[in-house]
Image (spheres, rainbow, N blue to C red):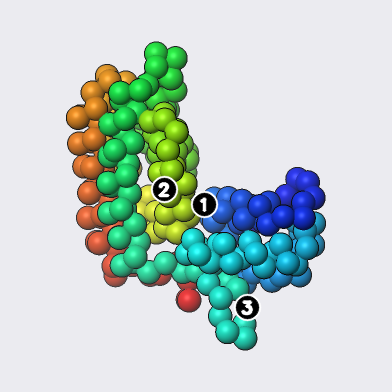
Amino acid sequence: MPAARESSSGSGPVVEAVRRAIVSGDCVPGQRLVDADLSEQFAVSRGAVRSALIELGNEGLVEHIPNRGARMRAVSLAEAIEIPEVRMVIEALCAAEAAQRVTEAEIAEPRELRERMATAVGAGVVTTYSELNNRLHRRMPETSGPRTDEGVIERLRGQSVRHRFRLAMQPGRPSVSLPEHLGIIDAICGRDPDAAERAARHHRGSMINTLRGTGNSPPFSAS
């Protein structure tokens, strides 16, 4: 888990660092989170660490086990399927609003992503494609304008990161998801809100169906 760059007496640096570690996959389900270790790592008080763990627990990222302390929470497959169902509604709205609001200057980035994603899939570089995929999904709520949905999506992203990684590793999945992502990008760049909403819904629906098919795959952790 990355260390905080500067000291702070508040819980904010711990919360943000743990969130980043979850989304990047540096933290694993079932991993223990020890107050003393985190206090030393982030140069904050143990009280600040406890406050951070409570906040992360409220977000569903951390669970508190009686007499054993805190640990990263493992998300079941059933819950991992529910998460994109929620994201489908939010991201469809974000995609539609992004298509309405996107400026000519902002269009350059999704166009660049379009080319790089296609190149990564063509070369079979799944990890690069996955990183570009995450970048696209982060940019949509940002382009759609100031809203609370961005924070909600980020928390949901953290909860499902392990299942998303397994999904990305499914044989042939990138060749399926690439045209779905390109459809979202083309609709946003074309400033077509209806098409952007449909494309976002179609993509999440496809993800849900594929996740359901991973039910017999080995879990990510023993927890």
Compared with 10, 143 (above or below) is above
The image quarter containing residue 129 is top left
Q: Position of residue 75 (x, y in %)?
A: 42, 67
Foreground pick, 148 / 218: 148
Can you identify the residue that label 1 sits on? 23
Q: CB atoms at circles 1 and 3 under 8 Å apart?
A: no
The image quarter containing residue 27 is bottom right
Foreground pick, 194 / 47: 47
Tell which circle, 2 or 1, labels the residue nearer the N-terminal end: 1
Q: Amino acid at mark 1?
A: Val
User: Dot 1: what SS?
Assistant: helix
Q: Nearer the viewer, mark 2 or mark 1?
A: 2
Q: Amino acid at mark 3?
A: Gly
* Residue at (23% x, 42% y) in the render: 201
Q: Position of residue 56 (x, y in %)?
A: 55, 62
Q: Amino acid at mark 2?
A: Ile
* Residue at (46% x, 69% y) in the render: 74
Tell which circle, 1 or 3, labels the residue nearer the N-terminal end: 1
Compared with 149, 165 (above or below) is below
> Taking 100 as reference, is 6 left or right?
right
Crowding at dot 2, Cα within 10 Å, few <14 / some 14-19 / many 20+, comes out as: many
Q: Quadrant of the N terminus?
A: bottom right
* Residue at (53% x, 72% y) in the render: 63
Q: Position of residue 65 (x, y in %)?
A: 56, 80
**Residue 132 in sight from this viewpoint:** no
Foreground pick, 78 / 216: 78
User: Dot 3: what SS?
Assistant: strand
- Label disc, if present, on residue 153 of the rendered structure: 2
